[in-house]
Image (cartoon, helix red, strand yellow):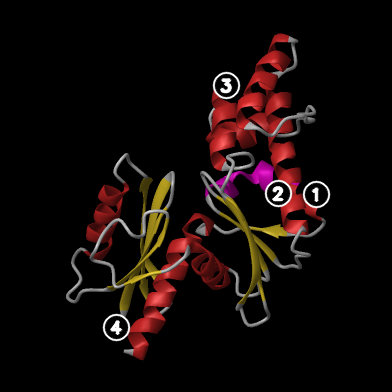
Amino acid sequence: MTFTIGIDSGSTATKGILLEEGIIRRRFLCPTPFRPADAINEAWETLRAGLETRPFLTLTGYGRQLVDFADKQVTEISCHGQGARLLAPATRTVIDIGGQDSKVIQLDRDGNLCDFLMNDKCAAGTGRFLEVISRTLGASVEQLDVITDGVAPHAITSMCTVFAESEVISLRSAGVPPEAILAGVVNAMARRSANFIGRLSAQGPLLFTGGVSHCAAFARMLESHVGMAVHTHPDAQFAGAIGAALIGQRQRKRG
């Protein structure tokens, strides 16, 4: 059997996938450490452990050039689109929100890349933004779904991480319930992402990937703003690594 490994070295998390003929056999996930190459090495050793032959390794993400033992390096845009199609074959648009950036990828009917937009200059609207604001209110991102369930969002005017944090502190001092503030932050992020998606005249089906896709409240609010169904998948955070492994699979078959 043909095994390939895809590793997505992201700014906040390192993801890895062992693929066998299009089937996910192993997953790897850890926070990206101070030295991202350490996580890449750990993912590589963990995913290939016990295999009789060396798998083809494709690297993507911010840290893809930090080690010299990869067989191929590819940009994350190509990987996320292909990974999304494996998870949801009908996908035409991908919205990926990670730790430090967000991107919208448009695909044609055959899954080929048509267009994309990427926001990597500011942390606004990313997982990092959500993490900072949640921590300011004494919560974690993992608690957001429970905390904001059924809560009307309070208006948030700033999407700059620094100014939003100050605004949140002021609202809390004014007696606004923290759950309403958190719901407002998630809603503001979702509205911003919907505007981002709209710039590509995106069409569905739409798949929500990246670490933030685990937040059901965000997906629900995004759906209300974007005007189409927003789908996700249990492996949505691994879309980049899946796509990298798929690219490696095709490369190996071509010989």
Q: Which mark is residue 225?
A: 1
In whole angstroms, how far apart are the C-alphas of marks 1 and 4? Answer: 45 Å
Query: Is label 3 or label 4 in front?
Result: 3
- Mark 4 secondary-structure assignment: loop
Q: Residue at x 49, y 63 (%)?
A: 76
Residue 180 vs residue 146: left or right?
right
Q: Amino acid at mark 3?
A: Thr
Q: Which mark is residue 193?
A: 2
In whole angstroms, how far apart are the C-alphas of marks 3 and 4? Answer: 49 Å
Q: Which residues are magenta?
A: 211-221
Front residue (pair 133, 72): 72
Q: Quadrant of residue 46?
A: bottom left
Q: Are marks 1 and 2 in contact (CB under 8 Å)?
A: yes
- Mark 3 secondary-structure assignment: helix
Query: Is label 1 or label 4 in front?
Result: 1
**Magenta span: helix, strand or loop, mainly?**
helix
| Residue position marked by numbered label 3 in the rendering | 136
Q: Residue at x 61, y 34 (%)?
A: 144
Q: Amino acid at mark 4?
A: Met
Front residue (pair 225, 21): 225
Q: Which mark is residue 1?
A: 4
Q: Residue 82: x percent and y percent?
A: 53, 72
- Mark 2 secondary-structure assignment: helix
Q: Amino acid at mark 2?
A: Ser
